[in-house]
Image: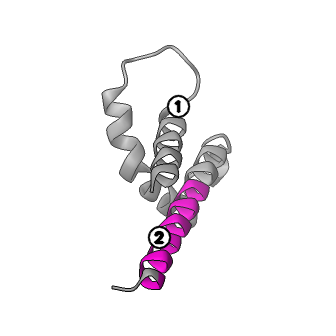
Amino acid sequence: MSYLAVQRGCILIRTLIDIYIFILIIDVIISYIPQYKSHPICVRIKQLSDYTCGPVRRMLPEMDIPFDISPMIVILFLKIFVAVF
């Protein structure tokens, strides 16, 4: 496999991770706007973000804070993965 193909593969993976981080940020914003939670696009965004945030939520202990920190943890891990990759 040529170096160019590997480089393009890395760029593709980084782009997909950046798009997923954008989806996570949109989900956080939507969670504070209750009238849009039942919109089909918002439901799909929630499903996509729950794919990684759900397991993180289950691993975190119960906390008395008014917001969900699992998207921040997922974004942190994705950014570390991109930096190493």
| Kind of residue at badge 1 | Asp
| Left or right, residue 12 beside residue 35 | left
Q: Residue at x 38, y 33 (%)?
A: 57
Q: Which mark is residue 68?
A: 1
Where is residue 23? Give x, y as percent: 57, 58
Of labels 1 and 2, earlier in sequence is 2
Residue 27 seen from this side? yes
| Mark 1 and mark 2: Cα distance apart in space | 30 Å
Label 2 environment density (alpha carbons within 10 Å; few <14, some 14–19, many ≥20): some
- Residue 50 drawn above or below residue 16: above
Where is residue 77? Give x, y as percent: 46, 42
Where is residue 78? Give x, y as percent: 48, 49
Q: Residue at x 62, y 49 (%)?
A: 25
| Left or right, residue 51 beside residue 29 | left
Magenta region, residue range: 4-23
Q: Which residue is mark 2?
A: 10
Tag 1 near tag 2, CB within 8 Å: no
Residue sitting nearer the eye, 34 or 59: 59
Residue sitting nearer the eye, 41 or 67: 67
Considering the numbered disc 1 on the image, is that residue within a helix, a strand or a loop? loop
Considering the numbered disc 2 on the image, is that residue within a helix, a strand or a loop? helix
Residue sitting nearer the eye, 85 or 2: 2
Label 1 environment density (alpha carbons within 10 Å; few <14, some 14–19, many ≥20): few
Give the position of the N terminus as an image quadrant. bottom left
Q: Is residue 81 a member of the stretch shown in magenta?
A: no
